[in-house]
Image (spheres, grey):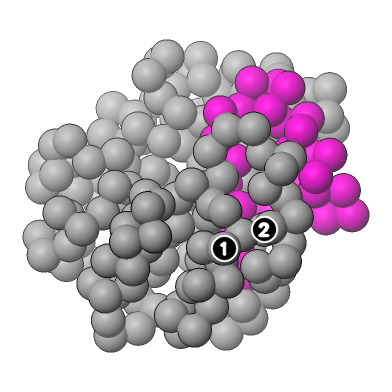
């Protein structure tokens, strides 16, 4: 489906050459690049911090979609904002004051995103849907690429779409050409994909992106 956005997640890329990977993805047609920040506390993995995001910024021609899997968020938010992302997505589960954090992101002139883990209910969206520009539904337990989509994710997206008809809904984790159509039919408008895009090396990024776009 043409209107669906595919956002490659560089977590699956070559960490020794992430700038080149971002450029290769842009050349392959990626309009968004999904950047996964993990702190080894909120999730059991550790990727990189603000300096890396800042270094990647000039290599991301399109939207730098920053996904902060960190807790607490607020102490590091200014440094991540300074790095220049177009959108900053924070986890509902990362602390007691997500409303304040979302306001801070918008006050900095960026798109504010809210991410929810597989076990988190959607009730909070009733009180936060006007504070966000993007809802990120985790299709897997965050921390690692290459996992299998949790089947309940599809019903969850359908329920969220019901609650917020116009909100961009991003599904993150476990997206493949096999489940993309079901996710879009349920209401997803952005598909994050790591392993489905990075399989086969840089020359495969374009074909993988187009295959996923066509399947969705
Ligand atoms: C998981 C990350 C996802 C992950 C997606 O914690 O937030 O963005 O990189 O990777 P795949 O598409 O391989 O599940
Ligand atoms: Zn992510």
Q: Nearer the viewer, residue 127 or 88?
A: 88
Position of residue 60 relative to residue 101, above or below, is above
Position of residue 79 relative to residue 153, above or below, is below
Residue 127, x across and y down, in percent: 11, 65
* Residue 45 sits in quarter: bottom right
- Which region of the structure is painted magenta? 11-38
Residue 48, x across and y down, in percent: 71, 68
Residue 88, x across and y down, in percent: 45, 57
Q: Nearer the viewer, residue 150 or 74?
A: 74
Q: Nearer the viewer, residue 23 or 154?
A: 23
Q: Nearer the viewer, residue 204 or 130?
A: 130
Left or right: 41 with respect to 54?
Answer: left
Mark 1 neighbour class, 10 Å CA radius: few under 14, some 14 to 19, many 20 or more: few
Left or right: 203 with respect to 160?
Answer: right
Left or right: 178 with respect to 4?
Answer: right
Residue 28 on the magenta span: yes
Residue 105 on the magenta span: no
Residue with the mark numbered 1: 82
Residue occupying image coordinates x 83% and y 29%: 202
Residue with the mark numbered 2: 53
Residue occupying image coordinates x 84% and y 39%: 20
Left or right: 207 with respect to 178?
Answer: right
Is residue 148 in sight in this rendering? no
Q: Which quarter shows the N terminus? A: top left
* Residue 7 sits in quarter: top right
Query: For the residue with label 1, is its CB less than 8 Å from the closest atom of ligand 2?
Result: no
**Between marks 2 and 1 in the image, the one whose residue lies nearer the viewer:** 1
Q: Secondary structure at mark 2?
A: helix
């Amino acid at each position: 489906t043409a209107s669906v956005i595919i956002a490659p997640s560089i977590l699956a890329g070559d960490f020794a050459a992430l700038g080149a990977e971002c450029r290769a993805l842009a050349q392959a047609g990626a309009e968004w690049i999904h950047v996964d920040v993990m702190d080894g506390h909120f999730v059991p993995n550790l990727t990189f911090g603000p300096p890396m995001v800042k270094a990647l910024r000039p290599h991301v021609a399109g939207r730098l979609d920053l996904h902060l899997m960190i807790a607490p968020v607020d102490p590091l938010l200014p440094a991540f904002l300074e790095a220049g992302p177009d959108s900053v997505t924070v986890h509902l589960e990362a602390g007691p004051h997500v409303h304040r954090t979302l306001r801070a992101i918008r006050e900095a002139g960026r798109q504010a995103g809210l991410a929810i883990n597989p076990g988190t209910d959607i009730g909070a969206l009733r009180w936060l849907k006007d504070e966000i520009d993007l809802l990120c539904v985790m299709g897997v337990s965050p921390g690692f690429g290459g996992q299998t989509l949790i089947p309940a994710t599809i019903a969850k997206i359908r329920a969220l779409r019901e609650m917020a008809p116009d909100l961009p809904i991003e599904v993150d984790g476990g997206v493949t050409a096999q489940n993309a159509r079901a996710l879009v039919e349920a209401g997803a408008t952005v598909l994050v994909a790591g392993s489905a895009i990075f399989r086969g090396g840089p020359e495969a990024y374009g074909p993988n992106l187009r295959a996923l776009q066509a399947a969705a």
